[in-house]
């Protein structure tokens, strides 16, 4: 397999929204469907969230919803269904995702651990693992806008990171409501090779510590830490 090609990777910011729903159509839905009637959902599902269904690795993005008595009862999404679904089939809705434009930028992350070497009368004896260390992350993206314009459906990357503007109601990826707002960074690498699965890398609970703005280079750079020791990696067939 060829070396990792950044041009074939898609990077997203994702908030912590989570919900489950069920298909509400006696005949189910065939492959290619772009809209489904649903139930068992509490409240309104935000546009930009994603969902997956049992037996289907494809990640679908919700682009529109309709509500009945305040609860979402229909979703429109893309791409079209890869695998048919049946009535009452449960699906899982994940956080709102914002696709980033990387341009000439990059994403780096460092996993670390500390080792404590114990001695017996001055000689090396045993080793144990020290305190856990968070993942260090640096992300460079294209600087388009720092604030959204009237009518924009999605926030800017900076608004997403800061929970401002159109992202002010977003949900933290952390389970602890007393902790500062956090997000997930998702990398989907699809080599587009026959018979080769894509890889999904998740950097969970990222909190920015610096935001650097470079007008000349046209880049927005963020660095910070994830409150986990390891990235989550998964191979999936997204075709």
Image (spheres, grey):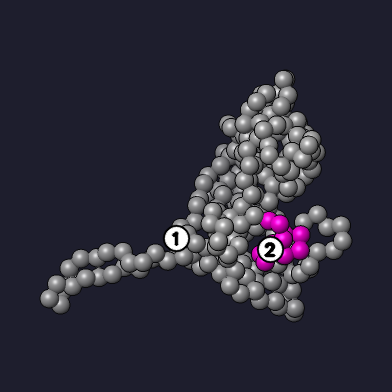
Please determine whether, in this image, residue 98 is positioned above or below residue 198. Answer: below
Q: Which residue appears at 63% of the width and 35% of the height? A: 91
Distance in Å between CA atoms under marks 1 and 2 = 24 Å
User: What residue did someone put label 1 on?
Assistant: 229
Q: Which residue appears at 14% of the width and 72% of the height? A: 120
- Quarter of the image holding residue 148? bottom right
Q: Residues within 10 Å of mark 2 (few under 14, many from 20)?
A: many
Q: Which residue appears at 49% of the width and 64% of the height? A: 135
Q: Which residue appears at 76% of the width and 63% of the height? A: 165
Q: Residue 140 at x, y = what percent?
A: 65, 68
The mark closer to the camera, 1 or 2, is 2
**Residue 11 visible:** no
Q: Nearer the viewer, residue 27 or 5?
A: 27
Residue numbers of the magenta segment:
160-170
Q: Residue 102 at x, y = what percent?
A: 68, 63
Circle 2: element type? loop
Residue 12 vs residue 125: left or right?
Answer: right
Residue 59's label in the rendered image is none
Q: Nearer the viewer, residue 68 or 110?
A: 68
Q: Nearer the viewer, residue 4 or 100?
A: 100
**Residue 90 visible:** yes
Please determine whether, in this image, residue 197 is positioned above or below residue 164. Answer: above
Between disc 1 and disc 2, whose residue precedes? 2
User: What residue did someone put label 2 on?
Assistant: 163
Asked whether residue 180 is drawn in magenta, I would say no
Circle 1: element type? loop
């Amino acid at each position: 397999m060829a070396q990792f090609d950044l041009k074939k990777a898609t990077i997203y910011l994702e908030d912590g929204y989570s919900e489950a729903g069920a298909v509400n159509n006696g005949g189910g839905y065939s492959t290619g469907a772009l809209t489904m009637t649903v139930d068992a959902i509490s409240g309104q599902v935000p546009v930009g969230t994603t969902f997956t269904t049992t037996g289907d690795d494809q990640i679908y993005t919700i682009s529109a919803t309709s509500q009945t008595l305040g609860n979402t009862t229909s979703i429109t999404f893309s791409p079209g269904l890869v695998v048919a679904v049946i009535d009452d089939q449960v699906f899982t809705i994940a956080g709102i995702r914002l696709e980033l434009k990387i341009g000439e930028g990059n994403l780096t992350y460092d996993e670390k651990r500390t080792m404590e070497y114990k001695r017996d009368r001055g000689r090396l004896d045993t080793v144990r693992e020290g305190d856990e260390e968070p993942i260090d992350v640096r992300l460079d993206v294209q600087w388009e806008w720092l604030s959204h314009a009237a009518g924009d459906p999605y926030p800017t990357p900076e608004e997403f990171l800061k929970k401002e503007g159109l992202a002010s109601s977003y949900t933290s990826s952390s389970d602890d409501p007393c902790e500062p707002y956090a997000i997930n960074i998702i990398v989907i690498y699809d080599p587009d090779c026959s018979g080769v699965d894509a890889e999904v890398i998740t950097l969970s609970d990222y909190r920015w510590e610096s935001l650097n703005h470079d007008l000349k280079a046209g880049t927005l750079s963020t660095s910070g830490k994830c409150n986990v020791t390891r990235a989550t990696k998964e191979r999936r067939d997204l075709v």
